[in-house]
């Protein structure tokens, strides 16, 4: 997915360095990593009407155990929106 300047695949450390540079260049606050992007996608997917079973398949989880964490976070977002309405 990510390649070095020489065309070889980037390893985990190379991807972390790439994200660190891109984060600084973009001036983003806080954490930014492939995991952060995956986590943000999962929450947004659920808050916008996606279901846990589809998310499980999209993320490649064998069980719903990990997806339950995202569902709990998404429920918090829904409660906050409800209070603001």
Image: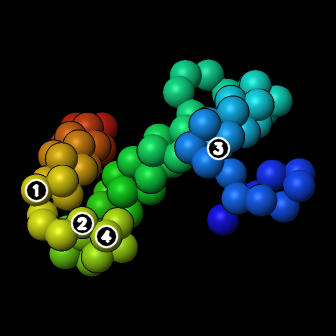
Quarter holding residue 65: bottom left
Badge 1 marks a residue whose secondary structure is: helix
Give the spatial CA distance, label 4 vs label 2: 4 Å
Q: Which mark is residue 18?
A: none
Give the spatial CA distance, label 4 vs label 1: 12 Å
Q: Position of residue 50 (x, y in %)?
A: 30, 71
Comes first in the chain, label 3 or label 1? 3
- Asked whether the beta carbons under mark 4 and mark 2 sit within 8 Å of each other, the answer is yes
Give the spatial CA distance, label 3 vs label 1: 27 Å
Residue at left 12%, top 64%? 64
- Asked whether the beta carbons under mark 1 and mark 2 sit within 8 Å of each other, the answer is yes
Badge 2 marks a residue whose secondary structure is: loop
Q: Position of residue 82 (x, y in %)?
A: 23, 45
29 with respect to 56 (left or right): right
Mark 3 highlights which residue? 15
Residue at left 61%, top 48%? 11
Q: Nearer the viewer, mark 3 or mark 2?
A: 3
Which residue lies most toward the right here?
6
Mark 4, other Cα within 10 Å: few <14 / some 14–19 / many ≥20: few
């Amino acid at each position: 997915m990510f390649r070095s300047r020489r065309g070889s695949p980037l390893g985990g450390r190379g991807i972390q360095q790439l994200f660190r540079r891109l984060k600084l260049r973009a001036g983003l606050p806080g954490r930014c990593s492939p995991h952060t992007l995956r986590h943000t996608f999962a929450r947004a997917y659920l808050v916008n009407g996606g279901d846990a079973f589809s998310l499980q398949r999209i993320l490649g989880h064998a069980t719903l155990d990990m997806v339950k964490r995202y569902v709990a976070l998404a429920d918090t977002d829904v409660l906050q929106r409800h209070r603001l309405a």
